[in-house]
Amino acid sequence: MRAAIGKYVVLPSDEALTAVTLWVAATHIQSVLQHAPRLAVVGPTKGCGKSRVLDVLHETVHQPIMTVNMSTAVLFRVIGKNPRTILVDEADTIFSKAGENEELRGLLNAGHQRNRPAWRISGPEHKPTPYPTFAMAALASIGDLPDTITDRAVVLRMQKRKPGEKVTPFRSRYAVPELNALRDKLAAWLGPLRGTAARMAPTMPVEDRAADTWEPLVIIADLAGGHWPAHARAACVAMTRFEAVQDEQTNLKTRLLRDIHRIFQAHGNPESLSSLDLVTALLQDPDAPWAEHGTKGLNAHHLGNMLRDFGISPANYRFDKGRQAKGYARNRFLDSWARHCPDLTETAPAPAHDATPAHRAQGKPPAAPAGQLPVGPPGGPTGPHRAR
């Protein structure tokens, strides 16, 4: 199974290939597991192989159901005592806006652990009815999934193949019979071992939720024996440590967005601030990490690199007394504040020369006033207009 998966997709590492193989096997005994780890297949752009991973999973996991837009009501009815394996492509479209599909996200989070039913009123007598939520699920997404989902997931961070990295073309005529045969062999091997798997409490190299998430994979590895137990635990340590670093970086960038929001407020919410003013204000906060950032503290180059991940870039602006300098337009931050700091946007005061309150209520970017127009490249579709 490991060789077959590696034949059709290029995964980020050997540890990732090991993890996917064990995850596939775990779907065939999920009815006796206590936790149902999610598999988050994420990549920065199209063409990273995310959908191909789901194609391979569809032919190898236990009773797959593939979807690109499943409603919560359907998901309630798909999951039962012997749950199917849920495969969701284009999951970024489901959670594209802050606060969207909270019910579905809650169901996916609850389904990570057994005995966390969702209660609904149903039937002609309107009786409270528990619906099972426990089921393994793989979600493919451009960009990160919500933190509450990735926190319960084995995360594959896909990248585009390098020149020279080859895979076997996935042709259904040939690939499906091969993968289905391996799936059936895997299920036949694991069937008699369900009772043993249910009683196993393997030693784990991680703790808390990470241990819950990886335990089913380690159980499979311990059942297989040979090199698998050591390789599974090595993959667990390597991939959870990598995600811990990613979380730390993400938290730092979210802190940056919040601090910039505070600085704009302190300056009266102007249409733009220079890079120098932003960096100076960030460094002056004694409780912030920016003075220790890098080797000599945060600078304009660091600021640009960190904001680039949010699609925010500097441009040339005119400031007081005709001074021109690199800076950032406030309305370039609105989308990122809404996505990553939604609590800020609800109470964010309007700029002094912003658009009308009705525009603000609809989330539209403010129009740039005269005297603050960029004199260089435009800030993008939501940035101020180019000077003419």
Image (cartoon, helix red, strand yellow):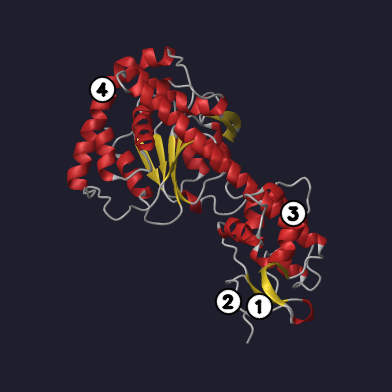
- Above or below for 74 versus 348: above
Q: The residue under label 1 is which amino acid type?
A: Pro
Find residue 236 and name its label. none
Q: The residue under label 2 is which amino acid type?
A: Pro
Of labels 3 and 1, earlier in sequence is: 3
Find residue 188 and name its label. 4
Tell me the residue that label 2 is attached to: 377
Labels 2 and 1 touching (C-beta < 8 A): yes
Of labels 3 and 4, earlier in sequence is: 4
Between 128 and 343, the residue placed more toward the observer is 343
Element class at badge 4: helix
Task: Name which residue lies at 63% across and 87% down.
Answer: 388
Element class at badge 3: helix
Q: Nearer the viewer, mark 3 or mark 2?
A: 3
Tell me the residue that label 1 is attached to: 374
Q: The residue under label 4 is which amino acid type?
A: Ala
- Name the spot of residue 12 as percent of width and height, x first: 38, 43
Q: Residues within 10 Å of mark 3 (few under 14, many from 20)?
A: some
- Name the spot of residue 229 as percent of width and height, x first: 37, 21
Tell me the residue that label 3 is attached to: 283
